[in-house]
């Protein structure tokens, strides 16, 4: 698998803007309308950060329909390239729209999101609603994940996870959500989060060899450049929320895997 890191310019005159309030023109249960409504953008130069106003019934419709689609699909996704991979978004809706501006809109581009959709940012509701709307509109082009574990011996363990389910405090499901790579351990170590484990480069190498994989792509940690390699480029962390919470001077990244499995990165 080849890697190419190319940074995209931060053009301040070509920003994607936040949709502004409009009056609904169809039923609150019309999911096509909700999708169209959410994806609209205002003209360049408008002030970002305006709210998208949705009724509770509209939000419930999105959540219910998206849940049904996700539950019909396998817990272990086996996707074909090309695909765009996004890390943490954390309710930074404006930056989510920038991701689509960089990567292209579905279904012209396929997307895999690695989790951490909400919290921290000011527009978590708008963020999750847009993601769910895209999942409903393009179920075979748009995928949402919610993860390494010392209890993971076979991919079938993930395939056979019963859903929906609560996340336990211990075990496989907990670990695939909460474990983190660490340069301070060789194998497994305690996690400062107070849950799950940290894992070292040796664990990554053994996991890839056992399952005949080339690369682990994960999210869930802020990294300065938007992406960061670990274990001799056998694992990469993707973080897609630039200037995280307004407190970190980090970039955000979008990872692209082409049909030849060549990986490249665009920087927000």
Image: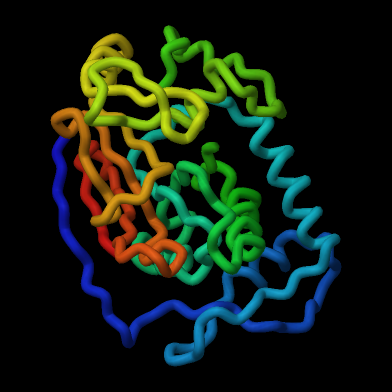
Which residue is at the far bottom? 45
Identity of the residue drawn at 35% across and 63% down:
248
Q: In which quarter of the image is residue 20?
A: bottom right
- Quarter containing the N terminus: top left
Q: Where is residue 198 in the image (x, y as percent from the top left)?
A: 37, 26
Q: Describe residue 60's horizontal placement relative to residue 11 as left or right.
A: right
| Closest to the observer, 183 or 86 | 183
Identity of the residue drawn at 39% across and 56% down:
240
Query: How many numbered marks does the figure carry?
Result: 0
Colour pattern: rainbow
Q: Describe residue 209's horizontal placement relative to residue 158 as left or right.
A: left
Above or below, comparing residue 10 to residue 252 in the picture:
below
Q: Where is residue 147 in the image (x, y as percent from the top left)?
A: 45, 30
Above or below, comparing residue 190 to residue 225 in the picture:
above
- Quarter containing the C terminus: bottom left
Identity of the residue drawn at 15% across and 42% down:
3
Q: Where is residue 4 in the image (x, y as percent from the top left)?
A: 14, 48
Q: Quadrant of residue 261?
A: top left
> Does the rendering let one see residue 1?
yes
| Closest to the observer, 158 or 229 | 229
Q: Where is residue 130 in the image (x, y as percent from the top left)?
A: 60, 60
Q: Quadrant of residue 205?
A: top left
Identity of the residue drawn at 43% across and 63% down:
100
| Closest to the observer, 259 or 227 | 227
> Does the rendering let one see residue 104?
no
């Amino acid at each position: 698998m080849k890697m190419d890191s190319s940074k995209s310019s931060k053009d301040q005159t070509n920003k994607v803007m936040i949709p502004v309030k409009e009056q609904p023109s169809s039923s609150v249960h019309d999911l096509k309308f909700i999708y169209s409504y959410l994806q609209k953008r205002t003209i360049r130069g408008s002030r970002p950060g305006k709210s998208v106003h949705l009724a509770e019934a509209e939000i419930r419709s999105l959540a219910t329909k998206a849940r049904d689609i996700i539950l019909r699909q396998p817990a272990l996704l086996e996707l074909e390239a090309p695909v765009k991979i996004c890390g943490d978004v954390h309710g930074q809706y404006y930056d989510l729209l920038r991701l689509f501006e960089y990567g292209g809109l579905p279904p012209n581009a396929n997307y895999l999101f690695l989790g951490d959709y909400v919290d921290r940012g000011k527009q978590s509701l708008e963020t999750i609603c847009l993601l769910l709307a895209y999942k409903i509109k393009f179920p075979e082009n748009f995928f949402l994940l919610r993860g390494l574990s010392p209890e993971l011996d076979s991919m079938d363990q993930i395939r056979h996870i019963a859903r929906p389910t609560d996340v336990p405090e211990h075990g496989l499901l907990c670990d695939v959500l909460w474990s983190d790579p660490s340069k301070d351990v060789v194998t497994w170590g305690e996690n400062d989060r107070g849950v799950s484990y940290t894992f070292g480069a040796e664990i990554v190498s053994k996991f890839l060899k056992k399952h005949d994989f080339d690369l682990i792509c994960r999210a869930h940690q802020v990294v300065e450049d938007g992406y960061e390699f670990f274990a001799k480029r056998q694992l990469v962390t993707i973080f897609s929320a630039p200037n995280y919470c307004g407190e970190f001077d980090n970039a955000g990244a979008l990872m692209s895997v082409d049909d030849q499995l060549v990986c490249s990165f665009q920087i927000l």
